[in-house]
């Protein structure tokens, strides 16, 4: 009888120990502070009415997704350590898309980048209270509708406003929860996209007012500051060298669910750069040119056709004045020009991790900018793209 009782006890232990171990493992997993996430993307791109190969290969002058044929995007690894009130985020990128994302890092010029060319974000944060969070380091921009990672975008190709707005900032920002629905952010930062250190000893100020409701959110963003510094008589520059003045940008980003299956987003931005300084060889004088810059508006309409298939369109109008951006779109003799770009994309969720994005895009400009298949100047370009985005 004793042996029978002993056998019962052993069997109970045999079946309960894995359950206890599983519960302990789940508890430890919940307590774990170190997490990993990321993505990898590749794509195929081809033009309909312009060359896709050789030195005359054409593409819109927007960021990412503009290489010909079968091309690589990037591998993205985000490591987060989250403590009770403090934490750190290290966001690393590898590949062409990642290199484009950190294009203005000072050490990333001249082939001297080293390991810094893979750092997309690197910051520490402190939750001072439930209502206040401080972030110090390099973080992706708060302006605009689109983001660097393809996981966060519906369209694979990107807009002109995103491409010529900031990508990243390095500085100190404070986020305030004003109420359950309203938030405010204030920041002091290096010049835009200057991620590793401040080469010019000038600083940029940022602010954001946000509203989040049950159906969507709205953010009003501001940026103000000198992006390339001022001349110093103690450090001579080349005769005739010029520096830009202060940059001011205001940006509105909003998006709301119209129904359970229909979503509408909007992004509008205005950027102006004041005339700066001219170094004439011995003295520094103020430039007398007019302000330059760009502005634009884009609408995003997305419809869920099923649990795994969505269809969306992006329409964007983008305008440059007084050569605010050179090489982005066709400009007239006054440095003015505009473009209307229309993109239709599908999002097919093959699995929880894999998304296929077929896309057709057309860019129509006021002035000549592209080349057609006969290598003649053209105002428009249409293309097809198929991307595969894997997230984990």
Image: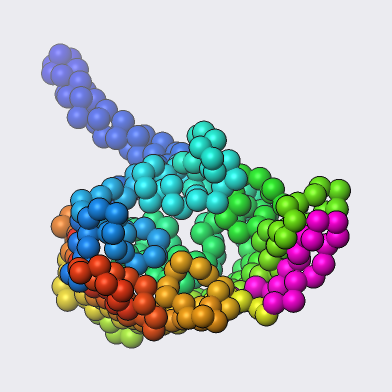
Residue at image location 81% in from the left, 56% down from the top: 281
Where on the picture, by quarter, is residue 88? top right
Residue 2 or residue 300, whichever sits in front: 300
Residue 357 or residue 185, whichever sits in front: 357
The colour scheme of the drawn protein is rainbow
Is 140 left or right of 199, judged from the image as shown? left
Residue 191 percent coordinates (x, y):
65, 57
Is 166 left or right of 277, judged from the image as shown? left
Residue 189 or residue 319, whichever sits in front: 319
Q: Give the number of callouts.
A: 0
Residue 60 percent coordinates (x, y):
34, 67
Asked whether the viewer can see residue 269, the reply is no
Residue 334 percent coordinates (x, y):
55, 81
Asked whether the viewer can see residue 313, the reply is yes
In the image, the segment drawn in magenta is 266-289
User: Which residue lies most toward the top here?
Assistant: 3
Where on the picture, by quarter, is residue 270? bottom right
**Magenta stretch contains residue 172:** no
Residue at image location 36% in from the left, 58% down from the top: 64
**Magenta stretch contains residue 278:** yes
Residue at image location 20% in from the left, 69% down from the top: 374
Residue 200 percent coordinates (x, y):
72, 52
Instruction: Using the image, determine if residue 234 lies above or below residue 300.
Output: above
Give the position of the N terminus as an image quadrant: top left
Residue 373 or residue 70, whichever sits in front: 373
Residue at image location 42% in from the left, 75% down from the top: 330
């Amino acid at each position: 009888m004793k042996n029978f009782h002993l056998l019962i006890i052993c069997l109970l232990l045999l079946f309960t120990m894995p359950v206890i171990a599983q519960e302990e493992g789940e508890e430890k997993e919940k307590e774990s502070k170190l997490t990993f996430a990321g993505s990898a993307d590749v794509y195929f791109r081809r033009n309909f009415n312009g060359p896709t190969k050789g030195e005359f290969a054409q593409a819109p002058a927007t960021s990412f997704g503009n290489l010909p044929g079968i091309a690589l995007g990037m591998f993205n690894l985000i490591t987060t350590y989250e403590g009770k009130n403090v934490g750190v985020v290290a966001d690393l990128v590898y590949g062409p898309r990642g290199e484009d994302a950190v294009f203005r890092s000072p050490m990333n010029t001249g082939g001297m980048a080293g390991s810094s060319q893979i750092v997309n974000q690197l910051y520490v944060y402190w939750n001072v209270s439930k209502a206040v969070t401080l972030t110090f380091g390099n973080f992706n921009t708060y302006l605009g509708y689109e983001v660097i990672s393809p996981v966060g975008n519906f369209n694979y190709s990107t807009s002109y406003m995103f491409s010529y707005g900031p990508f990243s900032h390095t500085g100190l920002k404070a986020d305030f929860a004003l109420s359950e629905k309203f938030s405010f952010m204030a920041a002091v930062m290096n010049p835009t996209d200057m991620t590793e250190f401040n080469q010019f000893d000038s600083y940029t100020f940022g602010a954001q007012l946000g509203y989040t409701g049950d159906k969507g959110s709205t953010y009003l963003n501001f940026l103000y500051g000198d992006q390339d510094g001022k001349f110093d008589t103690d450090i001579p520059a080349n005769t005739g060298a010029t520096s830009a003045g202060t940059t001011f940008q205001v940006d509105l980003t909003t998006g709301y669910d119209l129904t359970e299956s229909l979503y509408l987003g909007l992004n509008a931005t205005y950027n102006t750069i004041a005339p700066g300084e001219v170094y004439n060889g011995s003295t520094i004088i103020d430039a007398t040119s007019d302000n330059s810059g760009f502005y634009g508006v884009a609408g995003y309409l997305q419809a869920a056709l099923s649990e795994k298939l969505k269809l969306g369109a992006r329409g964007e109008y983008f305008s440059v004045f007084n050569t605010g951006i050179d090489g982005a779109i066709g400009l007239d003799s006054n440095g003015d020009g505009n473009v209307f770009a229309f993109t239709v994309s599908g999002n097919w969720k093959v699995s929880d991790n894999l998304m296929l994005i077929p896309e057709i895009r057309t860019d129509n400009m006021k002035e000549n900018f592209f080349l057609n298949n006969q290598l003649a100047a053209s105002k428009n370009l249409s293309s097809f793209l198929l991307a595969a985005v894997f997230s984990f």
